[in-house]
Amino acid sequence: MSEREVLLELKDLCKYFPVRSGLFKQHLNLLKAVDDVSLQIYRGEAFGLVGESGCGKTTLGKMIAGLYHPTRGSIFFQGTDLAALKDNQRRHFCRDIQMIFQDPYSSLNPRMTIEEIISEPMIVNKTHKGAEIGKRVDHLLNCVGLASAYKNRYPHEFSGGQRQRIGIARALAVNPKLIICDEAVSALDVSIQAQILNLLSDLKDEFKLTYLFIAHGLAAVKHISDRIGVMYLGSIVEVAPKAAIYDAPLHPYTRALISAIPIMDPHKRKQRILLQGDLPSPIDPPSGCRFAGRCFERCPYAEQAQVLHPCGSNHLVACSAALERAHSAA
Amino acid sequence: MLLYFIKRVLMLIPVLFFVSVLVFLIMRVFSPDPATIVLGQHTTLEKANAWREQMGLNEPIIQQYLDYMYNVLHGDFGVSYFTNTPVTTELLSRLPATIELSVIAIIIASIVGVFFGIISAVKKNSLIDNFTMTTALIGVSMPVFWLGMLLIILFSGYLHLVPSGGRIDALMRPLGGTGFYFYDTLVIGDYEAFFNALQHAILPAITLAGYSMAIITRMTRSSMLDVLHQDYIRTAKAKGLSSYRVIFKHAFRNALLPIITVIGLQFGSLLSGAVLTETVFAWPGIGAYSVQCILRSDFPVIQGVVLIVAFIFVMMNLLVDLLYAALDPRVKYAQESA
């Protein structure tokens, strides 16, 4: 695992949305949804990205999938900077990067049959031709556990879990290298969630996929991820292999998230860290350490902007106090 | 589907019954006495009474209604008080003019309205969107007769491009035929007459289309905006589709339902006689004719017109509902009625 090929690299990626207010919309503020995110995803891994609602994780995913233009920064996919491409060139990369969406009920076009939905990406991206397309639709449906006899039906005839399987088949149609799962299971029943997660991890080996898993809780990504990134208020505060995140979290925010995961044993009591206050508004976020307002630890670095620093092997954390502690412990 | 169709057609009966009762009562309660209008104001009481007796207007109102409905069900809508011709003949001779005008108007309104509605939605809050929406607002608010007069003054008065009224020059009128001049002139190959009819129709059609066009534009815009924010549009973009394909293949097809509804309803109201437009342009359709008949208390004609209009309106609604099933896989009438 030491010599790993970087499939996707984000460099100082930013997405600011202009927010106008006032009677004549004269005040212009910037909502900093994603602010200076740098990240590497290796080929063949499943990278979990967690953070609470509104922290910018979906915006990040949409930028990678080409649904949003980044305000600044670069997205290197196999060496090509996608952020610098024009729309019509950018579209060629849709066959390499596909997205599975959160809500399986609204993300399928109600006017199209399953076959149309799954075959359309192959037709517009010209990945397959003629009779191949029909065969591939059948094959994909079988891969995701649906009978190919269903292909002439419409989305409303399926249940939520089945629809998410259709969404997965659709994403797989063009043989993508990277799949972004944007809360792909959070709209489903818990029993169905497990099925879909198992399906995704089976497909990962079969189709040699790389996943970017976006979720709002650590519990959901634990099952499937190799490495995990924790996002807070538009920036990444900690990146580490799964084991390190769960066993030795460094950033106070990650520690709070870990302590919030329920444990199965009712006799075991774990100290739960309760964060005070709410997520600050991403419009004019706090200067200095973004987490300072809610941090339960007193530290001298609250006024300083925190950036990711390496701490041990494959572990990055954006907290000077945590770094010091780790170094003194070592 | 067939069952649903039959059910809907059966529902016509109570609608038409109610409409007939209403118009029958309104005419007899609120209209001036037709006898004095038909015979002139200097007629004697005896003559007027004799005429009323002859027309059956002295019977109790329920008896009058039952007699009328008996005749209607036998295909007899009565005879006009003024021309002494059967109401069916009168209406059939004028209906083609109205249908022709309405069809042209709804085609113009749909094409222009849908086109600008889509552009407005896609380029929301842009200059062209603001311009279109302002124009649509003017279109909705502008009185039809005033718009008609302005168009006559400009295109007919100053520019002499088109005639100011009528359906066709008298000498070119196709004889016999269906009464649909566009069809009749083309069938006999008289292209000069065809273009003459087209010239006559263009201003009233635009005038008539104005309001519907504005309504269709606004409905298209709001329906498209609604659909463009749906998740499956995001999915379509993520598939790597061009924006043209996203807009037409994915968005427009889903936005079509409310647009079809409003076009159907607008067409229904256009068919039911564009009273003001037909009057301004001296267009010999049922709109202008029914105004004349109301002014002179021509009971049988008014009753006939209202029944036909109600019938057309209900049928248009039915047509729109049937189109739903064809357009949207989620709509299935057969299951509901089974």
Image (spheres, coloured by chain):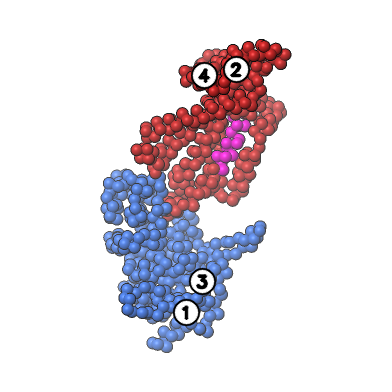
Q: Residues within 10 Å of mark 3 (few under 14, many from 20)?
A: few
Q: Is residue B248 visible?
A: no
Mark 4 or 2: in front is 2
* Contact (Cβ within 8 Å) of mark 4 with mark 3: no
Q: Is residue B204 magenta?
A: yes
Tell me the residue that label 3 is attached to.
Answer: A278
* Contact (Cβ within 8 Å) of mark 4 with mark 2: no
Tell me the residue that label 1 is attached to.
Answer: A319
Residue sitting nearer the eye, B18 or B64: B64
Kindly identify which numbered label has been placed on residue A155: none
User: Which quadrant would the C terminus of chain A be assigned to in this image?
Assistant: bottom left
Residue sitting nearer the eye, A17 or A155: A155
**Chain at tag 4:** B
Residue at the (51%, 65%) spot, across then down = A33
Q: Which chain is red?
A: B
* Contact (Cβ within 8 Å) of mark 3 with mark 1: no
Choose the circle earlier in sequence order: 4 or 2.
2
Q: Is residue B293 magenta?
A: no
For this view, does B34 lie left or right of residue B19?
A: right
Up the image or down, B42 lies above or below A170; here it is above
Tell me the residue that label 2 is attached to.
Answer: B58
Q: Residues within 10 Å of mark 2 (few under 14, many from 20)?
A: some
Name the amino acid type tagged 2. Answer: Asn
Discs 3 and 2 carry the same chain letter: no
**Chain at tag 1:** A
Name the amino acid type tagged 4. Answer: Asp
Mark 4 or 1: in front is 4
Name the amino acid type tagged 1. Answer: Cys
Name the amino acid type tagged 3. Answer: Asp
